[in-house]
């Protein structure tokens, strides 16, 4: 079985990625390799942060590794909150406060277009590859639904009339930014073998 590290301790993300990559991959989380550090995300791009996390694991633990970074990019806000999505309303990573600030900044805006974008950086030996997944959609004016996390209650993906927080996890994973980026990673692995 191919062993690979996913630089996260988020159990939900690990489950999602394991389901997409299938049984020939043994995906280890940071905890599984004895890494309980919070890897600093100091870049001002999603690409840069994904690379920092993957590089940290490769350099310090020696494993081939992939890492992801995601941002919500809102057209009327010139791409904000973008790479700062987790800390939009402050360092506390508070989703409720982030959504409140987003809705406040979107008050009166006619253009409600937005997208989630995920970048995955894979480091295998000396080689590095990047994969991207995007889902387009719109920001509504008030929260709807209680599933998911982050900005899910205010984001309606293209082709749906419900927010991410009103979709089942299967529905969301089928169209989501992270689902799409992981599908590209999976395709790369399968073509390689
Ligand atoms: P991360 O890079 O996956 O940790 O994502 C950074 C931030 O983007 C999260 O803290 C959330 O605020 C937001 N985010 C990422 N993915 C999603 C999603 O699927 N739904 C809603 N918000 C998300």
Image (spheres, helix red, strand yellow):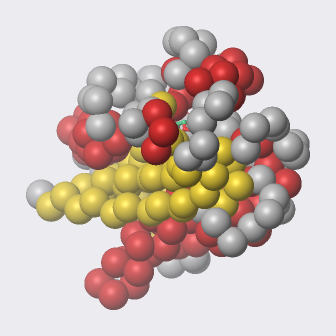
Q: Nearer the viewer, residue 164 or 141?
A: 141
Residue 142 quadrant: top right
Q: Nearer the viewer, residue 134 or 33?
A: 134
Q: At which x and y percent is residue 129? A: 23, 62
Residue 187 quadrant: bottom left
Asked if 29 appears above or below 83 in the picture, the reply is: below
What residue do we see at 41% from left, 39% from top? 79
Q: At which x and y percent is residue 110? A: 60, 43
Q: Nearer the viewer, residue 13 or 132?
A: 132
Q: At which x and y percent is residue 144? A: 85, 43
What residue do we see at 48% from left, 39% from top? 76
- What is the tally of numbered marks visible in this picture? 0
Q: Is residue 98 visible?
A: no
Q: At which x and y percent is residue 7? A: 43, 44
Q: Nearer the viewer, residue 190 or 181?
A: 181
Give the quarter the ligand 1 occupies: top right
Residue 132 quadrant: bottom left
What residue do we see at 80% from left, 49% from top? 165
Q: Is residue 40 visible?
A: yes
On the rendered image, what quadrant is the C terminus found in?
Answer: bottom left
Q: Is residue 114 left or right of residue 60?
A: right
What residue do we see at 15% from left, 61% from top? 127
Asked if 189 appears above or below 7 in the picture, the reply is: below
């Amino acid at each position: 079985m191919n062993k690979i590290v996913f630089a996260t301790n988020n159990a939900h993300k690990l489950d999602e990625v394991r389901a997409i990559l299938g049984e020939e991959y043994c995906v280890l989380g940071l905890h599984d390799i004895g890494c309980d550090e919070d890897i600093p995300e100091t870049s001002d791009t999603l690409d840069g942060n994904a690379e920092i996390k993957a590089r940290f694991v490769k350099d310090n633990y020696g494993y081939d590794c992939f890492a992801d970074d995601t941002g919500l990019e809102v057209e009327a806000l010139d791409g904000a909150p973008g790479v700062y999505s987790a800390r939009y309303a402050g360092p506390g990573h508070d989703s409720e406060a982030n959504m409140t600030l987003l809705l406040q900044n979107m008050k009166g805006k006619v253009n409600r277009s937005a997208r989630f974008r995920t970048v995955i950086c894979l480091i295998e030996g000396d080689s590095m590859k990047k994969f991207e997944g995007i889902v387009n959609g719109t920001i509504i004016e008030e929260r709807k639904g209680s599933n998911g996390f982050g900005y899910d209650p205010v984001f309606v993906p293209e082709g749906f009339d419900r927010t991410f927080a009103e979709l089942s996890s299967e529905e969301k994973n089928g169209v989501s930014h992270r689902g799409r980026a992981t599908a590209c990673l999976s395709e790369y692995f399968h073509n390689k073998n």
